[in-house]
Amino acid sequence: MLRVLAAAPGPLPAEAVAAQVGAPRASTYRLLRVMADEGFVVHFPEERRWGLGIATFEVGQAYLRRQPLERLARPVLLRLVRSLRRTAHLGVLHGAETLYLLVERPPTTAPLVTAVGVRLPAPVTASGRALLAQLPEAHVRALVGEELVRRGGRGPADVDALLGELASERAQGWSAEDGLVTPGRRSVAAAAFDATGRAAAAISVTTDDDDRTPRAALVDGVLAAAGELTRRLGGRTPRD
């Protein structure tokens, strides 16, 4: 069942899960409720659908530390750091949050709040926005809810405002945040894709507000890095 939910582009009705696993509906409902109690799946009652829960990601964290995504991404991030001399991150979606798997920074750069293992609300991070932008609107609504977490009163006020911003970011191919995570710092990010064309992770770079590096240079850097990671994953973009 978890594989079925993981492969779906969004939450599924229980009957669809039952049909794909070849199990009786009653047994499927019972197992889904048990897994929901443990956090492995989440029920969206208004939609009568089920999706992956946070516990699924938490159990997988030990594997994530050793699996190919991080191994393949680390050289890409290191080259990006050497090229731009700015801090670079690898992030994935963890429910409605961005989970940082890798952080690489120049030797003289002070640590940021976005350390490995830190989770932040996806709508306020560049990486989270780059990944949310690749999801169907219904999936984004189900993940983040109608009332968004805002930091310091900044960021999109509601999910409709967020969806409008994500549509623009999806069209341009990259996302940004300006002071939403840490005042005085800004980030840009782009998504990398797996073999199914789904966004597997996002690569971002962070700078200070007084950094004179043109944003276009930062964007070009993360787009090139995300493209390289996509190729290393054997992936394809939705446009391929």
Image: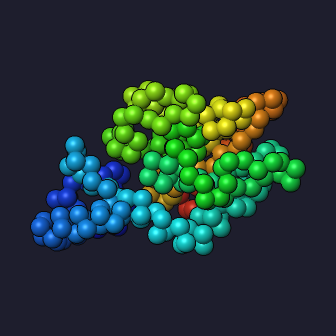
Q: Depth check: 152 or 56 in front?
A: 152
| 14 sits left or right of 224 in the view | left
Looking at the image, is 13 positioned above or below residue 56?
above
| Residue at x 69%, y 33% (from the top left corner) | 183
Q: Can residue 235 be seen at all in this image of the molecule?
A: yes
Q: Where is residue 13 shown, x and y percent of the image?
A: 21, 54
| Residue at x 53%, y 67% (from the top left corner) | 61
Q: Quadrant of the N terminus?
A: bottom left
Count of numbered circles in the view: 0
Q: Quadrant of residue 41?
A: bottom left
Q: Where is residue 59 shown, x and y percent of the image?
A: 46, 69
Looking at the image, is 152 positioned above or below residue 132?
above
| Residue at x 11%, y 67% (from the top left corner) | 26
Q: Where is residue 232 shown, x and y percent of the image?
A: 62, 61
| 99 sits left or right of 15 in the view | right
Q: Residue furthest right?
A: 108
Q: Where is residue 27 shown, x and y percent of the image?
A: 15, 70
Looking at the image, is 75 positioned above or below residue 187?
below
| Residue at x 39%, y 45% (from the top left corner) | 143
